[in-house]
Protein backbone atom coordinates (compact mmCIF):
# COMPACT_ATOMS: atom_id res chain seq x y z
CA UNK A 1 0.00 0.00 0.00
CA UNK A 2 2.79 2.41 0.95
CA UNK A 3 4.63 1.71 -2.30
CA UNK A 4 1.50 2.41 -4.33
CA UNK A 5 0.92 5.71 -2.56
CA UNK A 6 4.51 6.82 -3.09
CA UNK A 7 4.29 5.91 -6.76
CA UNK A 8 1.07 7.90 -7.05
CA UNK A 9 2.72 10.87 -5.37
CA UNK A 10 5.70 10.76 -7.75
CA UNK A 11 3.41 10.47 -10.77
CA UNK A 12 1.31 13.44 -9.71
CA UNK A 13 4.32 15.65 -9.06
CA UNK A 14 5.92 14.64 -12.37
CA UNK A 15 2.76 15.42 -14.32
CA UNK A 16 2.38 18.80 -12.60
CA UNK A 17 6.05 19.58 -13.21
CA UNK A 18 5.60 18.84 -16.91
CA UNK A 19 2.53 21.08 -17.02
CA UNK A 20 4.63 23.82 -15.37
CA UNK A 21 6.76 24.18 -18.49
CA UNK A 22 5.83 27.30 -20.44
CA UNK A 23 7.54 28.87 -23.44
CA UNK A 24 9.41 32.00 -22.38
CA UNK A 25 10.60 34.47 -25.01
CA UNK A 26 13.42 36.93 -24.40
CA UNK A 27 14.56 39.76 -26.67
CA UNK A 28 18.27 40.58 -26.75
CA UNK A 29 19.47 43.69 -28.59
CA UNK A 30 23.07 44.43 -29.57
CA UNK A 31 24.31 47.83 -30.69
CA UNK A 32 26.71 47.78 -33.62
CA UNK A 33 27.04 51.12 -35.48
CA UNK A 34 29.60 49.63 -37.86
CA UNK A 35 30.05 49.93 -41.60
CA UNK A 36 30.10 46.76 -43.67
CA UNK A 37 33.31 46.94 -45.75
CA UNK A 38 32.40 47.59 -49.37
CA UNK A 39 33.30 44.88 -51.93
CA UNK A 40 35.17 42.88 -49.30
CA UNK A 41 34.50 39.17 -48.85
CA UNK A 42 36.23 39.28 -45.44
CA UNK A 43 33.12 41.05 -44.21
CA UNK A 44 32.24 42.06 -40.68
CA UNK A 45 31.71 39.74 -37.69
CA UNK A 46 29.62 40.95 -34.75
CA UNK A 47 29.28 39.04 -31.48
CA UNK A 48 26.47 39.03 -28.95
CA UNK A 49 26.53 37.14 -25.64
CA UNK A 50 23.49 35.43 -24.12
CA UNK A 51 23.47 34.12 -20.55
CA UNK A 52 21.04 32.93 -17.92
CA UNK A 53 18.55 31.13 -20.18
CA UNK A 54 17.29 27.79 -18.87
CA UNK A 55 16.22 25.05 -21.24
CA UNK A 56 16.93 24.27 -24.87
CA UNK A 57 16.00 26.59 -27.72
CA UNK A 58 12.47 26.23 -29.10
CA UNK A 59 12.64 29.09 -31.60
CA UNK A 60 14.98 31.90 -32.72
CA UNK A 61 14.15 35.05 -34.66
CA UNK A 62 16.63 37.73 -35.72
CA UNK A 63 16.14 41.50 -35.94
CA UNK A 64 18.31 43.63 -38.22
CA UNK A 65 18.64 47.39 -38.67
CA UNK A 66 20.88 48.15 -41.66
CA UNK A 67 20.88 51.49 -43.46
CA UNK A 68 22.07 52.51 -46.92
CA UNK A 69 23.98 50.29 -49.32
CA UNK A 70 22.62 48.01 -52.04
CA UNK A 71 20.64 45.10 -50.64
CA UNK A 72 21.51 42.73 -53.47
CA UNK A 73 25.21 43.04 -52.55
CA UNK A 74 24.76 41.74 -49.01
CA UNK A 75 25.30 38.31 -47.49
CA UNK A 76 24.66 37.48 -43.83
CA UNK A 77 24.64 34.44 -41.61
CA UNK A 78 24.06 33.66 -37.93
CA UNK A 79 26.11 31.06 -36.02
CA UNK A 80 24.93 29.81 -32.64
CA UNK A 81 27.23 29.39 -29.62
CA UNK A 82 26.63 25.64 -29.41
CA UNK A 83 26.00 24.77 -33.04
CA UNK A 84 23.48 25.79 -35.65
CA UNK A 85 23.98 27.90 -38.77
CA UNK A 86 21.48 30.01 -40.69
CA UNK A 87 21.90 32.07 -43.85
CA UNK A 88 19.83 35.18 -43.10
CA UNK A 89 20.07 36.60 -46.61
CA UNK A 90 22.20 35.77 -49.61
CA UNK A 91 22.26 38.59 -52.19
CA UNK A 92 18.50 39.07 -52.16
CA UNK A 93 16.85 39.13 -55.57
CA UNK A 94 19.59 37.25 -57.40
CA UNK A 95 18.04 34.51 -59.56
CA UNK A 96 17.42 33.81 -63.22
CA UNK A 97 13.97 35.38 -63.09
CA UNK A 98 14.98 38.54 -61.26
CA UNK A 99 18.30 40.36 -61.50
CA UNK A 100 21.80 38.98 -61.66
CA UNK A 101 22.75 41.86 -59.37
CA UNK A 102 19.91 41.51 -56.88
CA UNK A 103 17.57 44.15 -55.49
CA UNK A 104 18.77 47.74 -55.39
CA UNK A 105 16.87 48.92 -52.29
CA UNK A 106 18.88 50.46 -49.47
CA UNK A 107 18.75 48.77 -46.09
CA UNK A 108 16.71 46.52 -43.83
CA UNK A 109 14.67 47.14 -40.70
CA UNK A 110 13.24 43.66 -40.44
CA UNK A 111 12.65 40.53 -38.39
CA UNK A 112 13.70 37.20 -39.88
CA UNK A 113 11.64 34.19 -38.85
CA UNK A 114 11.42 30.69 -40.33
CA UNK A 115 7.65 30.75 -39.75
CA UNK A 116 6.98 33.82 -41.90
CA UNK A 117 5.16 33.07 -45.14
CA UNK A 118 7.29 35.21 -47.50
CA UNK A 119 10.92 34.46 -48.34
CA UNK A 120 13.16 37.51 -47.93
CA UNK A 121 15.21 36.44 -50.97
CA UNK A 122 12.28 37.37 -53.23
CA UNK A 123 10.75 40.17 -51.15
CA UNK A 124 9.90 42.32 -54.17
CA UNK A 125 7.39 39.65 -55.23
CA UNK A 126 5.30 40.18 -52.08
CA UNK A 127 4.35 43.87 -52.11
CA UNK A 128 7.03 44.97 -49.62
CA UNK A 129 6.86 48.06 -47.43
CA UNK A 130 9.70 50.54 -46.97
CA UNK A 131 10.15 53.21 -44.33
CA UNK A 132 11.15 56.86 -44.84
CA UNK A 133 14.83 55.85 -44.85
CA UNK A 134 14.21 53.42 -47.71
CA UNK A 135 14.69 50.32 -45.55
CA UNK A 136 12.69 47.16 -46.14
CA UNK A 137 10.36 46.62 -43.15
CA UNK A 138 8.26 43.77 -41.77
CA UNK A 139 8.80 40.12 -40.85
CA UNK A 140 10.28 37.82 -43.48
CA UNK A 141 11.18 34.17 -43.84
CA UNK A 142 14.87 33.41 -43.47
CA UNK A 143 16.68 33.22 -46.83
CA UNK A 144 18.41 29.91 -46.06
CA UNK A 145 20.17 29.58 -49.45
CA UNK A 146 23.51 28.11 -48.45
CA UNK A 147 25.55 28.47 -51.63
CA UNK A 148 28.59 30.56 -52.47
CA UNK A 149 27.28 34.14 -52.67
CA UNK A 150 29.93 34.91 -55.28
CA UNK A 151 28.52 32.37 -57.76
CA UNK A 152 28.28 33.66 -61.32
CA UNK A 153 25.24 31.50 -62.06
CA UNK A 154 22.12 33.36 -60.91
CA UNK A 155 19.89 30.35 -61.60
CA UNK A 156 21.75 28.47 -58.84
CA UNK A 157 19.96 30.61 -56.26
CA UNK A 158 16.60 29.55 -57.65
CA UNK A 159 17.35 25.83 -57.52
CA UNK A 160 19.43 25.58 -54.33
CA UNK A 161 16.57 25.40 -51.83
CA UNK A 162 16.53 26.59 -48.24
CA UNK A 163 18.98 24.40 -46.34
CA UNK A 164 20.39 26.72 -43.65
CA UNK A 165 17.51 27.95 -41.53
CA UNK A 166 17.17 29.30 -37.99
CA UNK A 167 15.54 26.01 -36.96
CA UNK A 168 19.07 24.53 -36.94
CA UNK A 169 19.44 26.21 -33.51
CA UNK A 170 16.42 24.42 -32.03
CA UNK A 171 17.19 21.95 -29.25
CA UNK A 172 20.54 23.61 -28.45
CA UNK A 173 21.74 25.65 -25.47
CA UNK A 174 21.22 29.38 -26.13
CA UNK A 175 23.89 30.58 -23.71
CA UNK A 176 27.22 31.75 -25.07
CA UNK A 177 28.55 33.94 -27.87
CA UNK A 178 26.41 34.28 -31.01
CA UNK A 179 28.05 35.53 -34.21
CA UNK A 180 26.42 37.63 -36.91
CA UNK A 181 28.54 37.81 -40.07
CA UNK A 182 27.82 40.26 -42.88
CA UNK A 183 29.61 40.96 -46.14
CA UNK A 184 29.13 43.40 -49.01
CA UNK A 185 30.28 41.53 -52.10
CA UNK A 186 30.11 44.18 -54.82
CA UNK A 187 31.36 47.75 -55.06
CA UNK A 188 29.04 50.73 -54.88
CA UNK A 189 26.84 51.71 -51.94
CA UNK A 190 28.09 51.33 -48.38
CA UNK A 191 25.79 49.80 -45.74
CA UNK A 192 25.89 50.35 -41.98
CA UNK A 193 24.69 47.91 -39.31
CA UNK A 194 23.05 50.05 -36.63
CA UNK A 195 21.93 47.22 -34.35
CA UNK A 196 20.79 43.62 -34.37
CA UNK A 197 18.99 41.33 -31.99
CA UNK A 198 17.90 37.81 -31.10
CA UNK A 199 14.40 36.81 -30.02
CA UNK A 200 14.88 33.45 -28.32
CA UNK A 201 12.16 31.14 -26.99
CA UNK A 202 12.99 28.44 -24.42
CA UNK A 203 10.79 26.28 -22.18
CA UNK A 204 11.08 27.58 -18.64
CA UNK A 205 9.34 26.47 -15.43
CA UNK A 206 6.63 28.83 -14.24
CA UNK A 207 7.26 29.84 -10.58
CA UNK A 208 3.53 29.74 -9.83
CA UNK A 209 3.10 26.27 -11.27
CA UNK A 210 6.18 24.97 -9.47
CA UNK A 211 4.87 26.38 -6.19
CA UNK A 212 1.62 24.54 -6.83
CA UNK A 213 3.57 21.32 -7.34
CA UNK A 214 5.27 21.82 -4.00
CA UNK A 215 1.96 22.48 -2.26
CA UNK A 216 0.35 19.37 -3.73
CA UNK A 217 3.34 17.25 -2.70
CA UNK A 218 3.19 18.68 0.83
CA UNK A 219 -0.52 17.89 1.20
CA UNK A 220 -0.13 14.35 -0.16
CA UNK A 221 2.80 13.59 2.14
CA UNK A 222 0.91 14.89 5.18
CA UNK A 223 -2.03 12.66 4.37
CA UNK A 224 0.30 9.73 3.85
CA UNK A 225 1.95 10.27 7.24
CA UNK A 226 -1.42 10.66 8.94
CA UNK A 227 -2.61 7.39 7.40
CA UNK A 228 0.51 5.61 8.66
CA UNK A 229 -0.01 6.98 12.17
CA UNK A 230 -3.60 5.74 12.26
CA UNK A 231 -2.60 2.26 11.13
CA UNK A 232 0.25 1.97 13.68
Image (tube, helix red, strand yellow):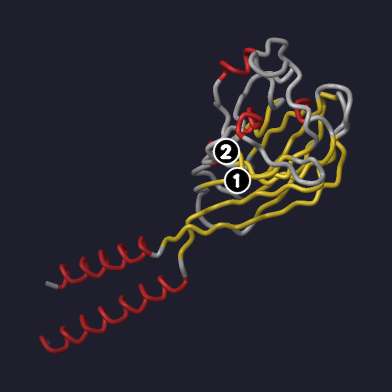
Q: Nearer the viewer, residue 141 or 211?
A: 141
Label 1 crowd bin: few (<14), some (14–19), many (20+), radius 10 Å: many
Residue 170 spot, x, y in % from top left: 51, 42
Q: Residue at x 16, y 83 (%)?
A: 228
* Direction from residue 11 to residue 98 in the image, left or right: right
Kindly check if marks 2 and 1 are in contact, taking CB atoms under 8 A apart as contact: yes
Q: Label for residue 186?
A: none
Q: Nearer the viewer, residue 129 or 156?
A: 129
Q: Nearer the viewer, residue 111 or 146?
A: 111
Q: Secondary structure at mark 1?
A: strand
* Direction from residue 43 to residue 124 in the image, left or right: left
Residue 80 spot, x, y in % from top left: 63, 40
Q: Is residue 220 above or below residue 184?
A: below
State the residue position of label 1.
61
State the residue position of label 2.
166
The number of discs equals 2
Amino acid sequence: MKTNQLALTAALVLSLGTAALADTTTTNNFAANQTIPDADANGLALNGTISGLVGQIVNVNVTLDITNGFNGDLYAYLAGPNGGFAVLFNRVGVSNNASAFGYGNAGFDITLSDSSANDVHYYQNFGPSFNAAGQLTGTWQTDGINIDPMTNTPSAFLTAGQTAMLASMNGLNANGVWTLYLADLSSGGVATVNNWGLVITVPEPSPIALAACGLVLFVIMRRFKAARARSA
